[in-house]
């Protein structure tokens, strides 16, 4: 069984379920919720922990920032036997009713990144597994956490969006932002689109839950840094996904 080149894990090391985080520091915080957590690998900034949830082995892995980094990790996790991947990340609010501190479960992602064109043409939507998305949303609601379900945007340029007036493309960037607001995009981030598209191509289940750290449309001065509720919702959601999968397997005999 080959060791994966970038994340340095072997087949079966993290089981069939994995939670992805952009921040390497978020990975051990996720793993604290596992039974018998242990670090498996740390290579090129990609940190991997594993443990047990609901009697099965699960993993928490750094995906890095942006589509290219995330795609490498997602592909290598699939090669290592993972069949359900949930992104646990941060975002910025786009819709005015989405406040700093809210959670967003992505049902689909706007493909404002270039990487996924290497997988599918632009006409193909980047969609989460509907059952995974529904379970994550219902879990957050049961935990009494403010949560929205809907579209997110996945982009390549962080500062092109945060500081558009510094770019020669300012007019186009402003137009795109207004288009997203008018079309119901809830939040903007950088990795959901590659996760969903690769999940479609490789035929695995994918989902994402992100926390809104700031909404520049409504309260740019209010920035939230606490991630505990995000992690709690993601881990509890993964437990429910495991239970649901086990129930389906029992029904199928």
Image (spheres, helix red, strand yellow):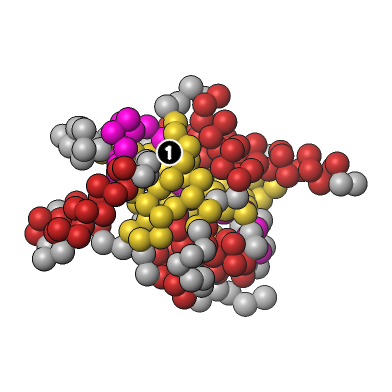
* Residue 136 position (above or below residue 23): above
What residue is rendered at 65% in x and 36% in y?
Answer: 240
Q: Position of residue 232 (x, y in %)?
A: 49, 34
Is 179 positioned to the left or the right of 248 in the image? left
Q: Nearer the viewer, residue 59 or 102?
A: 102
Q: Which residues are magenta?
A: 81-104
Q: How many numbered circles are shown?
A: 1
Q: Is-magenta flag for residue 101?
A: yes
Q: Nearer the viewer, residue 139 or 118?
A: 118
Question: Which element carries disc 1, helix, strand or loop?
Answer: strand
Q: Is-magenta flag for residue 68?
A: no
Tell me the residue that label 1 is attached to. Answer: 104
Report the residue that reaches farthest toward the top: 144
Is 149 positioned to the left or the right of 84 in the image? left
Is 153 positioned to the left or the right of 81 in the image? left
* Residue 243 position (above or below residue 51): above
What residue is rendered at 28% in x and 33% in y?
Answer: 96
Q: Position of residue 159 (x, y in %)?
A: 20, 57
Q: Position of residue 128 (x, y in %)?
A: 55, 51
Instruction: Please indicate, yes or no, whether residue 66 appears anywhere in the rendered image.
Output: no
What residue is rendered at 55% in x and 24% in y?
Answer: 142
Find residue 64 and report its image quarter: bottom left
Q: Mark 1 Cα within 10 Å, few/some/many (few <14, many 20+)?
A: many
What residue is rendered at 45% in x and 67% in y?
Answer: 122
Instruction: Please indicate, yes or no, whether residue 229 appears anywhere in the rendered image.
Output: yes
Quadrant in the picture for the N terminus:
bottom right
Find residue 34 and report its image quarter: top right
* Residue 243 position (above or below residue 128): above
């Amino acid at each position: 069984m080959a060791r994966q080149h970038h994340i340095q894990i072997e087949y079966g090391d993290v089981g069939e379920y994995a939670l992805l985080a952009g921040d390497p520091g978020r990975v051990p915080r996720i793993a604290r919720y596992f039974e018998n957590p242990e670090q498996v690998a740390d290579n090129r900034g990609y940190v991997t922990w594993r443990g047990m949830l609901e009697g099965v082995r699960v993993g928490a892995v750094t995906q890095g920032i942006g589509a290219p980094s995330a795609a490498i990790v997602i592909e290598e996790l699939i090669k290592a036997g993972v069949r359900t991947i949930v992104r646990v990340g941060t975002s910025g609010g786009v819709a005015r009713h989405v406040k700093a501190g809210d959670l967003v479960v992505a049902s689909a992602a706007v493909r404002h990144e270039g990487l996924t064109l290497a997988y599918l043409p632009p006409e193909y939507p980047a969609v989460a597994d509907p059952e995974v998305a529904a379970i994550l949303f219902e879990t957050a609601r049961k935990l009494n956490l403010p949560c929205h379900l809907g579209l997110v945007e996945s982009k390549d340029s962080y500062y092109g969006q945060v500081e558009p007036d510094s770019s020669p493309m300012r007019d186009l960037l402003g137009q795109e932002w207004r288009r997203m607001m008018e079309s119901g995009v809830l939040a903007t981030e950088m990795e959901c689109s590659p996760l969903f598209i690769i999940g479609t191509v490789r035929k695995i289940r994918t989902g994402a839950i992100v926390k809104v750290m700031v909404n520049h449309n409504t309260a740019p001065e209010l920035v939230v840094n606490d991630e505990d509720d995000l992690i709690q919702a993601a881990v509890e959601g993964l437990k429910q996904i495991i239970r649901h999968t086990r129930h389906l397997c029992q029904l199928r005999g």
